[in-house]
Amino acid sequence: MTSTFDRVLDELGSAVVTGAHPAWERRSIDQLAERTGASRSIVREAVRVLVGLGLLTARRRVGVVAVPIGMWDVTDPRVVGWRLAGSDRDRVLAELRALRRAIEPAAAAAAAERASDASCQDRLEALLAAADRLAAATGPDDAAAFLQADRELHRSILGMSGNAVFRRLGGVVARALDERAGIGPDLHDVALHVAVARAIASGDAAAAAAAMREIVDGT
C-alpha cells in the first residue's frame, strides 16, 4: 500500500517533471498541502526530498520554486520514473539506451578482467546464479522471474566492475530494465545474457563487452 508520503512525493515530483508546476514558479507549503490534501509536515518532508533531487528549491519568505531539468538528478530512479510517465517517454527511453550502451559494455569488460580477484567471488557467484535463473525463465508465464534475474545479473556486473560510478548508476539501469515488465523472455536475448555471464567468468573482456553491447542494442 502506498503511504501518504509516497503519494505526495510522486504527485509533487510528477508535477515538476510534467510542467504542471512550471520552472521558476513559486508556491507555498500551504498551497501544496491544499493541492495534495496532505498535512503540512508531510508536504515539507516531500519537498525536502525533491530539493535533494534538484527538482525544487525552498527558502523562507520565498517559498517552494520548481527548477528546470538541467538541475535535476536525472539518474535517480524516481526522477527516471516520473519522466517515463510523462509526454517525453520516447526521449527518455532513448537517453536510457544511450547511457546503458556507454557504461554496460565497459562494465562487463572490467568485470571480466576482475573475475579472478578474490574480492569478486561472491558477486561472480551471484552473476552465474542469476544467469542460470534467467535461462530457466523461458516459459510464457516467466516474465516476472526473468525480470528479477535480469536485474540481478546487470547489478552484479556493475558491482564487479570495480567502478564506483558504474555501481552508482545501477539504480537507473534497474529502472530502465523495469520497462520490460510483463514482456516474455526472448530466447536470443536469454542466450546473450548467459554468454555475457560466461565470458565474464572466463575472463574474456572482449567477448563480455560484445555480448553486452548486443543486449543493449536489442532492447
Image (tube, rainbow, N blue to C red):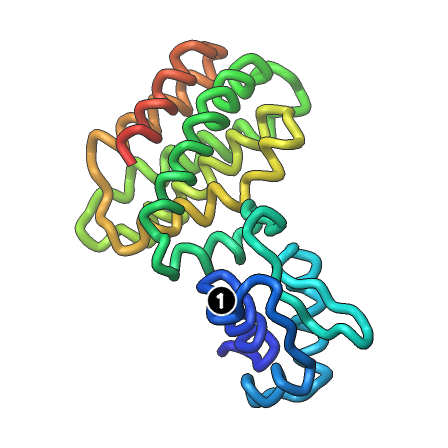
Viewed as shown, does residue 97 lie left or right of 203? left
How far across and down, in percent of the image, does residue 62 sit?
A: 76, 73
Which residue was labeled with disc 1?
A: 14
Residue 214 in the figure: left or right of residue 5: left
Residue at image position (64%, 26%) is 163
Residue situated in front as seen by the camera: 116 or 104: 104
Point 32% across, 48% down: residue: 90
Within 10 Å of the Cα at label 1, are there few (<14), some (14-19), or many (20+) other Cα atoms? many
Q: In the rendered image, which quarter is residue 182 located in? A: bottom left
- Residue 3 position in % (x across, y down): 56, 79
Give the residue displayed 34% in from the left and 27% down from the top.
194
Q: What residue is rendered at 60% in x and 51% in y?
A: 72
219, 28: nearer the viewer: 28
- Which residue in the rendered view is the most extreme toward the right? 60
Q: How many marks?
A: 1
Compared with residue 186, is residue 55 higher up or lower down, i.e. above or below?
A: below
Q: Secondary structure at mark 1?
A: helix
Q: Position of residue 26 (x, y in %)?
A: 64, 72
Viewer-closest of 64 and 215: 64
- Left or right: residue 207 versus residue 21 is left
The amino acid type, in three-letter code, at marker 1 is Ser
Image quadrant where one finds the C terminus:
top left
From the viewer's perspective, is residue 66 above or below residue 77? below
Question: Toward the viewer: 11 or 207?
Answer: 11
On the image, the x and y values in percent for residue 64 come to 68, 71
